[in-house]
Amino acid sequence: MEELAPRDEAELEEAIAGAVAGGVALAVEGEGSKRGFGHAVEARRRLTTAALRGVSLYEPAELVLTAGAGTPLREIQGLLDQQGQQLAFEPADYGLILGGPAGRGTLGGAVAVNASGPRRIRAGAARDHVLGFRAVSGRGEPFKSGGRVMKNVTGYDLSKLMAGSHGTLGVMSEITVKVLPKPETEETVVFRGLDDAAAVALMTAASGLPAEVSGFAHAPDDGGHTGLRLEGPAVSVASRRESLLARFGGEAEVLAEAASRAFWEAVRDVRPLAGRGEQLWRLSVAPADGAAVAARLAEAGLPIAGRLFDWAGGLLWLALEAGRHGAALREGLAGHATCVSAPEAVRAAEAVFHPQPPALAALSRRVKESFDPTRILNPGRMGEGL
């Protein structure tokens, strides 16, 4: 496939305008780490933002960073590490679960799929950390939104619209994000031997305590281990840890700095389920319902090869064996089910993203029509006509 690699916004505008004039559909991506997420795109050319890279502004004191959309996350995180700061939304690395190498995600890709890790329950999603961006629409027209401060009045907050749009509305050239200080220390209290129901009950109870837990996850493997992450000043972490141990008792292990980070990186990237089953689905449900949903699906006969709970049970990852499972997963589900990874034939036959109610689907089509009327940007990625 012919590849277009614009080096600046002017070349990006020229590339998209040329595609519009020629009626040539474009497969939009950064380093290609999320190519298998969503429906396959039928395009004659690939447009990569890989050359739109580099940090153009970083003001640690102001907690703001501006970088090209194609800037690798590993470079941004390395720069932030030097100043004791971080992307608090913990962008997930989908490399392994999509069958590719890890460490190839870009800032634009993270925002495009709204990739958010375990800290989302406290810090918010990727979209909540985008202060502004520059982009070119499917009309070949440049546009921008927001700025470099949290409070600005520049019209509609298009950041919320672009985040999670999977490159179907516009191609971002530059993104400004809010960064936050890294916590002084972190620990994870791990309770072992809990089944799904007991683990979700513990996480739900802990989420209602003043312990300021920043991560709640349960992995059933190896007898089950349930982690609660604590971050902040060392004295505060120690005090909150003791309150959790006193509240829940039982056998618990405390993971210090390095071990705690490794635990949450594995949860963030869904590593316990990498290579298990043929498909990987994520279900968003009410946290207290997570275990019951998993049990109901198992009783219904779904071939579950592995499961992982995040967000205190509100995010349920399921590795499934071969078959068409969308209808069974979504039947009676009070939430959303998204197919994150599956063979192309399965993604062609299934609705990858949870079907929208008619009114919302009509709105989505109108938004697509407004930004990309000729449907040249990742056509079909999010469904027919989108």
Image (cartoon, helix red, strand yellow):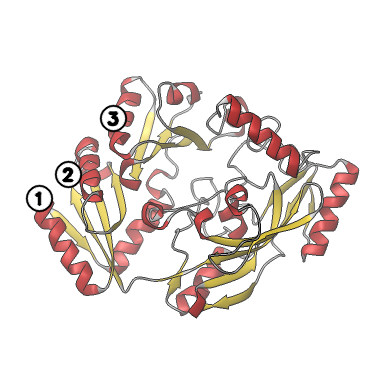
Q: Would you identify the image quadrant in which residue 293 lies?
A: top left
Q: Where is residue 314 shown, x and y percent of the image? A: 35, 41
For this orientation, the residue located farthest to the front is: 153
Q: Which residue is labeled 1 in the image?
A: 250
In this view, the residue in front, 107 or 154, is 154
Q: How would you rate the neighbour count of disc 3 (Cα within 10 Å): few for under 14, some for 14-19, many for 20 or more? A: some
Q: Nearer the viewer, residue 150 or 264?
A: 150
> Where does residue 141 sit, x and y in percent of width and height?
80, 53
Marks 2, 1: nearer the viewer: 1
Q: Are marks 2 and 1 in contact (CB under 8 Å)?
A: yes
Binning the other alpha carbons within 10 Å of mark 1 as few (below 14), some (14 to 19) or many (20 upward) gives few
Q: Would residue 41 be visible to someone looking at this image?
A: no
Q: CA distance from mark 1 to mark 3?
A: 23 Å
Residue assigned mark 2: 193
Q: Which circle marks residue 320 in the picture?
A: none
Q: Earlier in the sequence, mark 2 or mark 3?
A: 2
Residue at 36% in and 56% down: 122
Asked whether the beta carbons under mark 1 and mark 3 sit within 8 Å of each other, the answer is no
Q: Amino acid at mark 1?
A: Gly
First in sequence: mark 1 vs mark 3: 1
What is the CA distance from the residue labelled 2 to the residue labelled 3?
Answer: 18 Å
Q: Amino acid at mark 2?
A: Gly
Q: Which residue matches tag 3?
A: 292
Q: Residue furthest right?
A: 21
Residue 32 rendering spot, x and y as whole percentages = 64, 52
Q: Amino acid at mark 3?
A: Ala
Quarter of image, res 50: bottom right
> On the rendered structure, is 154 left or right of 113?
right
Q: What is the secondary structure assignment of the residue under circle 2?
A: loop
Task: Using the image as rendered, state which of residue 91 and residue 335 is in the foreground.
Answer: 335
Q: Position of residue 91 (x, y in %)?
A: 49, 57
